[in-house]
Image: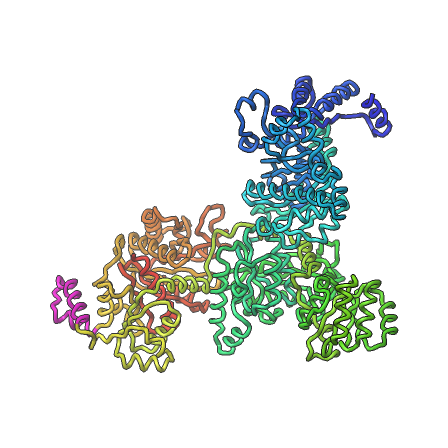
Amino acid sequence: AGLAAIRDALGPHVPGPVAAVGHRVVHGGASILGPAVVDDAVLAEVDACAALAPLHNPANATGIRFARETWPDVPHVAVPDTAFHAASMAPVAYSYALPADLTEELGVRRYGFHGTSYAYVSKKLAAALGKPPASLNAIICHLGSGASMCAVENGKSVDTTMGLTPLEGLVMGTRAGDVDAGVLAYLQRNGYDAAAVDALLNKKSGLLGLSGVASDMRAVKKAADAGDARAQLARDVFVERVRKYLGAYAVKLGGRVDAIAFCGGIGEGDADARMRICADLDGLLGVAVDPTRNAFAVDGAVADVSAPHASCKVFVVPTDEELEIATQTAEAAGVAPRAPVPAPRIQTLPKDANALPPVGPALLVDGGGATAPAELGLLFAALPMHGRLGFFRPVADPDDPKLLLVRDVFEMTEEPVEAMLGATPAEAAAMTAAGDGEKLVEQIVAKYVAYAAGRDFVVVSRPSDSNGANFELSADIAAAIQAPVVWVHGLYSEGSTQFQADHEADELTGGELAEIATAKAVLDEKAVRLAGVVVANLPADSYHAAVRDQLASLDVTPVALLPHDDSFEKVTVAELAKSIGAEVLYGAEAVKNKRVEEITISTLDVANLLGHLDDKPTNNQLVIVDSRRADIILAVSAVSRSKTIAGLLLTGPGLSKDVAAVLSDLQNHGGFPLPPILMAPGDMSTYEVAHKVTTTTPQMLSTSSAKICAARSLFEDHLEPRFRAALGAAPDANSVITPKLFQHKLFTKARADPRRVVLPEGEDPRVVAAAGELLERGLVQLTILGDPAVVAANAEAAGVAYQLASAEVIDPRACDEALFDELAAGFLELRKHKGVDLEKARELVRDDPNTFGAMMMKLGKADGMVSGACHSTAATMRPALQLLKTAPGFDIVSSVFFMLLKDGVKVFGDCAINVAPTADELAQIAVASARTAATFGVEPRVAMLSYASGDSNKGALIDVVKDATARAKALASEDSFPIEGPIQFDAAVDPAVASIKYKGLASEVAGHATVCVFPDLNSGNNGYKAVQQASKTIAVGPIMQGLAMPVNDLSRGCTVEDIVNTVVITALQSMDVE
């Protein structure tokens, strides 16, 4: 009769014929694992599960039978609460540690409930996160009179708190949740029969049993707030049980939790419970709740209540089990199309869809105005894609506001703040004034590399205080660390109140376009990619077609086109206090987010001032007043009860003891809500304070929540999809290494294991100056050959006498007799088969410093040698070939140059030794050059150069290169580097040319070669010199390869820097000998 009455009451409100009927079934057992069209077998299974859900399933079955009789011609669908879990939980999650026959015969296992709620919430949560449901990892808390939790991995339930029945797990309204099973036997031994125990655990426990007040959490909270200890305990136990399962499920998901979601009556309506449940989880999961967002998440909509910096989000997601049942019913019955899966917010574009190049592991941000909002927004955008973020400022002080802001918001506190900066402004200024700009960049690169190690993505902010003015330094840094650049345009200028005007015409001015074009030209000159431009203060709700066309005309990509947001123009009391160095006397908490909308300088009497404040259209007035005006201070404090005052900023000598005592008494004993009261520095007059307050744009602070939220929201909503995809894309496989990084890696490796290198030309001033630099940096140990007096004089002249004190200086013509005899005897042993006698051996060792140095290496007294500053190549290499010989597997010695090109380091070989190598020799040169490249951090992609590519031409030289390519591949069969040949130089190094000449052909080398092997000395020597002169690049070499121990030849016109680089490379080569 009751069901018939409901049917009749609903009838007039049904808009059309019934297409299908959905039925909630609490327990579907192990058989109904999803929405099932009801037939007699399904109905029988619902009846069979009545023993597992005696309060629900019998009623469910009755409803199904009545509905089938009432609407016999439409499909009926059973939607079990258990299906979401039972269909996907593994045996390890659903099995009890009981005899197996209980599971097989009685179905004793964990099933879980609230499945329709979890199915609905998981889809809504995935959509809010911009993820497909199948990739969602979340912990969902369905908290109500019946309460449970679910661990969702890849969109499916992997564990839940309820078990065989809805009694297991959390504390509920009247259900106990987890209880020691021994309690049941204990109760039975003390007079409780099975029915009494069942009633106790299901109807008299939970919040009701603990509090003695009610089963409704709202009533329990009211009693707890009034001081009821049992009610407070009930809330505490409820919260603690949820937190226990949060920890368990975080482990279950391996720490990979996208979000925690709250639903159900308590989950959606009890902000205090949410806050307590999520307290102190930032270290475990990166969870932090924003108190304001949390307090106002009560309007029935999906709400993100996370703090801006939280890496694991917290959402309130109102559930709708009825809608989920209807949706599943329609899908199962085939009466409605399957609901589309929400598209993920982050889309990876296919390569043929004009995708942008990957951003890579670092991004430098600069611009003509403020960049902090853009840097925050980009870090928030990168957060879901990269595990460990970083923020680095090339030039800044440790108390730099932006550094501290980002460090606090993203909790980058595992290292000292000094690790996040490259140099202080004082250091940078000193180096620049001394003409040591290169040294400054080197220091910044070294600090950056150390900081970036182990981080997935780093935003590099421009040098402090540059405001776009020192963009050359930014570009040099970006080039050195291989970071693309984002240029920010249209925000306010740091250090002033001058905000950029809105672009009301929805286009950029000629001056603005010129600024962007200039920035791009600077970057192009340094071979740095402009990843795109952020343009702010555009009209809302527009595609900005004109701006897009303007940027396209400059060949510039839009990163984000942002509407105007006045959040950045609103200043908080805390920001003003920080900017002028004011001390907060009262209202420290209120200072953080209290906005200042107008400023009043009080010179009036109290009555006129209060009248003036009343006439103002805004409440958020900052009143600046002399600290000796007790009448004004007390009057404004009193007015703050009825009219919101942003704060009082006091100037002058400070509060008198009497006024301070009155204010403290009001605050501590009178329940008097004082406004924020600040004290300006005593050396600033009222005029100076007012001038600074009104002419300075304060820096954002970690407490500037409105600005932080605005930055996050702007970039969430307006970051271009192509750039978002590039931000999360895997780094380009065709990586290059910049000259600065190349040099940094060399120096770091050398410094870690300093080798002994012989410098036979110690009487050359350049060699001595280089020796001083090498020793000062701790890169190598040195043996310098020459007259000690001449070496000392050169050292004194070069200002490196102190550094050379640690070097070993030997004059071969007057050295230790035992050492000389040992070297001469060793030489004799090695060359006597060539007719050398002892006298000749002694003569060569004494008179030829290269022979002396080579014998030191042969006898294990040195690891390498560098010569050639005042010796020919033949004089340098002859002793090495005679005494050290070639390395195993090599018949020839060859050479390479490291070409430190601004778009990346390339290796050219052979450019100094072999005049006309055979195919076999050319193959050896190719493999040796590739291995040399790899030793020094250059990923080898080998191009065997010729005057034709592939099969485009024929000729004897082409045939040699083809044969050499095949031999090189065979020789390097156990290496992993690709080799391509014959190929022309332009097709080898230029992707655009390669796309034409290698169209339709797969090649890892074409367009991306890092090792270029010339077919003969004529082309190689001219080739490296042509590139060197045309590009004004540094060529380090020739670096010899194929010797058993490293000896390298300098050019006669070498510089100190050339010698330093060659010595370091020699030291590193010696490490491979071992």
Nearest the eye: 937 or 108 = 108
Nearest the eye: 921 or 209 = 209
974 to 608, vertically: above or below: above
436 to 290, vertically: above or below: below
Residue 717: image location, x then y, percent: 68, 52
- Tell me, yes or no, if residue 940 can be seen here: yes
Side of 1060 relative to 391 (left or right): left
Residue 136: image location, x then y, percent: 61, 41
Side of 847 relative to 443 (left or right): left
Residue 50: image location, x then y, percent: 67, 22
Q: Please give the count of numbered marks on the rendered protein.
A: 0
Classify residue 329 by image quadrant: top right
- Tell me, yes or no, if residue 1018 can be seen here: no
Secondary structure, magenta segment, majority class: helix
Residue 530 falls within the magenta-colored stretch: no
* Span shown in magenta: 818-847
Nearest the eye: 756 or 900 = 756
Residue 77: image location, x then y, percent: 71, 25
Residue at left offset 48%, top offset 68%: 443
Classify residue 782 by image quadrant: bottom left
Residue at left offset 22%, top offset 63%: 858
Quadrant of image for the N terminus: top right
Task: Name the colour scheme.
Answer: rainbow
Residue 840 falls within the magenta-colored stretch: yes
Quadrant of image for the C terminus: bottom left
